[in-house]
Each structure stands twice: as C-alpha cells, then as structure tokens.
Image (cartoon, helix red, strand yellow):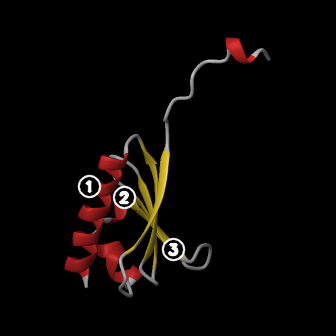
C-alpha cells in the first residue's frame, strides 16, 4: 500500500493502568457496583470486569486496575477517579 494513500492515524481506544495501592475485596465490590455492570468469575479469571459508561476496567484484588476503551485521557482519569471512590465506599 502506498503510504501517501493511507489515512492519518486516529485515536479510537486508549488503554491505561492504575494502582489504587490498596487490597480490594472483589466479592464485596461485586455487590457495591451492581451486578448488571460487573462480571466476576474467580474460577475463570482472577479479576473483576466492570463496564462503565465511558469504558471498561479490569480490577484485581492487589489494587491494580487496567482501564480500556476510552477516547481521551481525561475521560479515563475521571472514570478511574469515580471507580476509586466506589471501591473506597465498598470497603
């Protein structure tokens, strides 16, 4: 393919990582985040999958979080901040 014919790159999906630096009880978090937005099957995967309006988070009991599906860093930061507050309230 001729590079001159290629379309310019476009941001479609930003992935980030955060460390909330606290142990997280995933079973408590399932209840706090409401079941319809959460997938948690510890026999299949060691983390909790939380699907929010702006993106998705993979939350691990170690406090590490993978954030995916965002269009810009600002929305990812806002999502992570909101999730951190929900986790703090669930503890």
Q: Percent from the top left, x then y, of residue 74? A: 30, 48
Residues at marks 3 and 1, CA–CA distance in whole angstroms = 21 Å
Side of 52 relative to 81 (left or right):
right
The quadrant the C terminus occupies is bottom left
- Please state which of residues 44 and 11 is positioned toward the viewer in this rendering: 11
Q: Quadrant of residue 29?
A: bottom left
* Residue receiving disc 2: 37
Tell me whether circle 2 and circle 3 mark residues in contact (CB < 8 Å): no
Q: Percent from the top left, x then y, of residue 23? A: 38, 88
The quadrant the N terminus occupies is top right
Dot 3 or dot 1: first in sequence order is 3
Check residue 78 in the rendering and tell me which mark sits there, or answer none. Answer: 1
- Please state which of residues 16 and 37 is positioned toward the viewer in this rendering: 16
Tell me the residue at 46%/84% (across/down).
62
The secondary structure type at the circle numbered 1 is helix
Dot 1 or dot 2: first in sequence order is 2
Tell me the residue at 32%/62% (across/down).
80
Dot 2 or dot 3: first in sequence order is 2
* Residue receiving disc 3: 47
Q: Which of the two discs, 3 and 1, sits closer to the camera?
A: 1
């Amino acid at each position: 393919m001729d590079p001159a014919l290629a379309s310019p790159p476009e941001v479609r999906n930003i992935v980030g990582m955060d460390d909330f630096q606290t142990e997280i009880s995933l079973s408590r978090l399932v209840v706090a985040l409401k079941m319809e937005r959460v997938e948690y099957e510890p026999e299949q995967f060691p983390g909790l999958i939380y699907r929010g309006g702006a993106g998705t988070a993979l939350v691990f009991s170690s406090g590490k979080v993978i954030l995916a599906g965002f269009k810009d860093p600002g929305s990812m930061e806002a999502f992570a901040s909101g999730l951190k507050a929900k986790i703090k309230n669930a503890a």
